[in-house]
Image (spheres, rainbow, N blue to C red):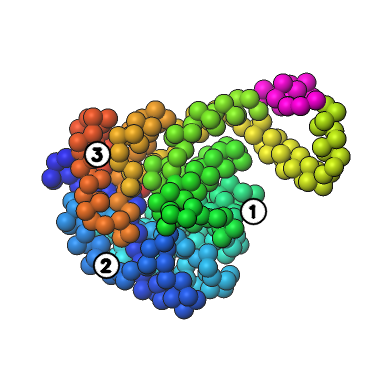
Amino acid sequence: MKENLQIIDIHHHIIPKVYKDALRKIGVTTAGGYPIKDWKPEDSLNMMNELNINIGVTSISEPATLPFNKKQASKVAREVNEYQAQLKKDYPERFKSFALLPMPHVKQSINEIAYALDELKLDGIGLLSNYGDQYLGDDIFEPVMKAINDCHGVVFVHPSSSSDKVKKPQYVVADFIEEFTFNTTRAATNLILSGTLDRYPNITFILAHAGGTLPYIEWRINQTLETLSYIMVNPKERLKPYLTGSKTKMIGEVAKHPIRYGKMFKTYLHSLKRMSQLQYSADDYIHRFYYDTALSTGDSTFASLKEVTDTSHIVFGSDAHYAPNDWIAKMEQDIGASNYFDENEQHQIFNDNSNALLK
C-alpha cells in the first residue's frame, strides 16, 4: 500500500459525550461486550493521521437508542446528529456522518430521517442489524425503509447483540467475536427474503464486517429460493417430494398439536408468498450489497467476497474506536498485501468506492 494513499474509513465509530452520558444514566456501560470508552474528536484525528486515513465516516455502534424509551431515544438521536453535523462543520475535510435514528420507534425515526438528511445534510443513515428480536426487513420497519428509499439513502448496517432470550456459548465471552457477524447475516438475509430490496431499490445498503457470514452461505440461500419458487408454482403437488413420513403420520402429528402447527403454517405461508414474488435470484441480491472490510481482511474472507460481488462493492472500514489501532494497521496491510486485489483494486477499496457512494 502506498503511504500517500488517502483512505476513506466507512466504519468509524464515535462516542459523543452526550451519548455516553445518556447511556450511563440508565445503567448501560458496555457495547458488544466491551466497556464504552471516553472519546473526543482529537482521538479520531490522531488515529486517522497515524493510519493514513483522510476521511472518517462517523456512526454510532450498538446499543444505539435501543435501551431508551421513545422520548429519550428521540432526544438522544437528535443530539447525536446535531453533534455530528457540527463535527462536519468543524472539520469539513476530515469527517462525513451516518445519522442515528431513534429506532425501533418507527414514527420518530421517520421524522429524524427528514431532519438529519434534509436539514443537517448528513451523508446517510446508520442502522443496527436488529433491535432486540426485531430485524431489518421485518414488517414493522417497512415505513422506515420507505422513507429512506424516498430519500435515495445510503444505509450502513452495523450488527447488534442478540435478544437476551438467546443463550450464548459459555466461553464466547463477547458478542463482537461471532454473534455480531451472525446478526448481520440474519438482517441481510431478511432484507432479501422479505422483498425489501425489490420494493425499495433506491436504498444502498453497506454491510459491516464483510457481510458477516452472508458470502459463505450464499449457495444455501440461493438454493432455498430456487426450490421455493419451484414449489409455489403448484404447492399441492410439488411439495410432496420434500415432505418426510407418511400422510397418515403427518395428519396425526398435526391433530395432536393443532395450535402449534396452525401458527407455524400461517407464518410459513406469509413468508413463502413474499419469497415467491422476488424478482431476482439470491446471487443478484447478495451482489447488490456493499461490504466493508472491518475486522474481515483474511484471505478466506476476500475469497468469499470475490465470489459473490466485485471489487467495486468492497469498501474499507476500520471499526474505530472499538478495534485497537494495531488491528486497524494490520487490516490496511492485509489489503495492501493481498493477492486478491491488484493496485487499482486496492485504491478502489481504500478510497474510490466510498467516495462514489457518498457523493
Residue nearer the viewer, 98 or 331: 331
Q: Is residue 195 left or right of residue 84?
A: right
Q: Is residue 144 left or right of residue 296?
A: right
Looking at the image, which residue is at 30% across and 34% down?
299
Q: Secondary structure at mark 3?
A: helix
Q: Residue 140, labelled with which disc?
A: 1
Residue nearer the viewer, 347 or 212: 212
Residue 246: x percent and y percent? Answer: 80, 25
Q: Is residue 149 left or right of residue 353?
A: right
Instruction: Find out whether residue 231 is within the magenta segment.
Output: yes
The image shows residue 21, relative to residue 128, as above or below, that is below
Q: Is residue 47 left or right of residue 130?
A: left
Q: Which residues, given as a range, are shown in magenta? A: 229-246
Looking at the image, which residue is at 50% across and 72% down?
75
Q: Gap between marks 2 and 3, in whole Å?
A: 27 Å
Disc nearer the start of the sequence (2/1): 2
- Name the residue type under label 1: Ile
Label 3: few (<14), some or many (≥20) within 10 Å?
many
Looking at the image, which residue is at 57% across and 51% down?
135
**Residue at the spot of label 3:** 335
Q: Secondary structure at mark 1?
A: helix
Residue nearer the viewer, 295 or 242: 242
Looking at the image, which residue is at 27% across and 37% down?
348
Q: Gap between marks 3 and 1, in whole Å?
A: 38 Å
Labels 3, 1: front one: 3
Residue 46: x percent and y percent? Answer: 19, 62
Q: Determine the image quadrant of residue 107.
A: bottom right
Label 2: few (<14), some or many (≥20) within 10 Å?
few
Q: Gap between marks 2 and 1, in whole Å?
A: 36 Å
**Residue at the spot of label 2:** 41
User: Looking at the figure, which quarter contains the N terminus?
Assistant: top left
Residue nearer the viewer, 38 or 45: 38
